[in-house]
Amino acid sequence: MSERTYLGFLPWIVFAVVSRGSLEGVAWGSIAAVLTAAMIAAASARNRSVKELEIFSLALFVVLAVASVFNQHDPQGFLQRYHNGLAMAALACFAVASLAFEPFTGQYARELVQRKYWNTRRFNRANVELTLMWAVVFVAIAASQFAAGAIETRLGATVFNWILPVGLGVAGIRQATLRWSDQFDGESMGLDAMLNLGELWDGP
């Protein structure tokens, strides 16, 4: 898969890292995630290749930033305890919702695959499968992080907020790479595929 796919997940990583450890952390984590998402979207806008995931991440963390400002002094508040799980659950919902229009991985996949494959059943099926796979990973990570909020112990936070989610994320990347290689590795590395990077927003 495209490295830009994983770059699109960066705001969630920044949010998780910055928001830990203090009552004000969720607010700061949300702001840091907004800034990260904005920089990614701005870089994409310069190339006229802004992705729906980038727009969604920016909107999501703006909402969380506003909500966290009003919730930051409540140590037992729902947002304080379950912010990581909420952010990942929102990402899972986005992945599932994208299937009704275009699997979110498809926008990234076009940058790697020759144009002649974009409208084929194989391309569409591969991206539906990849998006569903990621949705399952996101749901599993969200469930783990909700468990961390419910347990509220140092060990629980370490295991369910970090060790298990990182393991699930690594497994997801590995599975996505294997599935992509099975479907399009032979068509994704040629000169025509590289030229797609400059043709994505040309007319049909």
Image (spheres, rainbow, N blue to C red):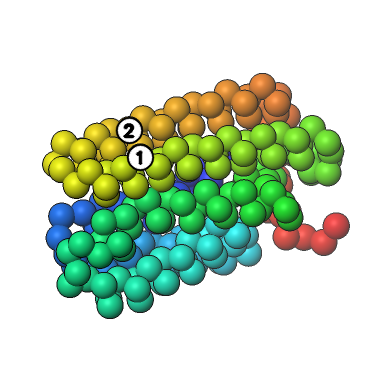
Q: Quadrant of residue 23?
A: bottom left
Q: Which quadrant of the structure image shows residue 47? A: bottom right
The residue under the point 69% across, 39% down is: 128
Q: How many marks?
A: 2
Inspect the image, locate mark 2, and give the three-letter code of the amino acid beneath it. Leu
Local SS, label 1: helix
Q: Give the label on residue 144, or none.
A: 1
Q: Are marks 1 and 2 in contact (CB under 8 Å)?
A: yes
| Residue 80, image x, y percentages | 25, 61
> Image check: 155 left or right of 51?
left
Quadrant (top left/top right/bottom left/bottom right) for the N terminus: top right
- Observer-side mark, 1 or 2, equals 1
How packed is label 1: few (under 14 Cα within 10 Å), some, or many (20 or more)? Answer: many
Left or right, residue 67 beside residue 80: right
- In this rendered view, identify the residue nearer to me: 79 or 6: 79
Residue placed at 58% from the left, 35% from the top?
Answer: 133
Residue 92 shown left or right of residue 29 in the figure? right
Q: Residues within 10 Å of mark 2 (few under 14, many from 20)?
A: some
- Asked whether residue 43 is in view, the answer is no
The mark that comes first in sequence, 1 or 2, is 1
Camera sees residue 22: yes
- The residue pinned by badge 2 equals 164
- Looking at the image, which is closer to me, 168 or 155? 155
- Which residue is rendered at x = 77% and y = 60% of the image? 202
